[in-house]
Amino acid sequence: MATNWTTVTDWKGILQSANTNTEGYFWLMILWAVWIVVLMLTSVFGLYPALMLASFIGMIFGLFLVYAELVAWPWVLTYLATIIIAILMISWTSNKR
């Protein structure tokens, strides 16, 4: 599977050619890899803070990828759902009343 470089005329074309060669999964896997790395690096602070920080960073990075038309919106909205679920879990499991 070779890339037709004659159709690539700008930076957006270069970025989209990676998705074309991998059937649209290259930037999605990069997004998930960033999320996993941030989650592992911040896991020393606890599960919920690490989950919320990794999801926030993944959501911000995902927004850039959505606006560059490299990733679809539903993938980025999973990070927002993860943040909301983590906030609800923190509020339900807290002992302060």
Image (cartoon, rainbow, N blue to C red):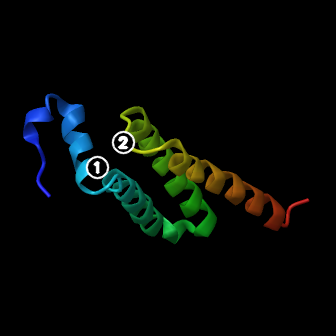
The amino acid at mark 1 is Asn
Secondary structure under tag 1 reads helix
For label 2, count other residues whose C-alpha is less than 10 Å away and answer few (under 14), some (14-19) or many (20+): many
Number of numbered discs visible in the structure rendering: 2
Q: Nearer the viewer, residue 27 or 88?
A: 27
Identify whether 84 is placed above or below 95.
Answer: above
Identify whether 24 is placed above or below 51.
Answer: above
* Left or right: 94 in relation to 20: right
For label 1, count other residues whose C-alpha is less than 10 Å away and answer few (under 14), some (14-19) or many (20+): some
Q: Quadrant of residue 25?
A: bottom left
Residue that lies at the very extreme toward the right in this rendered image: 97
**What residue sits 85% from the left and 67% below the top?**
95
Label 1, label 2: how many angstroms apart (C-alpha)?
7 Å
Residue at image mark 2: 70
**What residue sits 53% from the left and 54% below the top?**
55
**What residue sits 51% from the left and 51% below the top?**
75
Q: Quadrant of the C terminus?
A: bottom right
Residue that lies at the very extreme toward the top in this rendered image: 9
Q: Quadrant of the N terminus?
A: bottom left
**What residue sits 14% from the left and 28% below the top?**
9
The amino acid at mark 2 is Leu
* Left or right: 25 in relation to 40: left
Q: Position of residue 62 (x, y in %)?
A: 44, 44
Q: Are marks 1 and 2 in contact (CB under 8 Å)?
A: yes
Residue at image mark 1: 19
Q: Nearer the viewer, residue 6 or 75?
A: 6
Q: Quadrant of residue 6?
A: top left
Residue that lies at the very extreme toward the left in this rendered image: 6
Q: Which of disc 2 and disc 1 is earlier in sequence? A: 1
* Left or right: 9 in relation to 18: left
Secondary structure under tag 2 reads loop
Q: Position of residue 76 (x, y in %)?
A: 52, 47
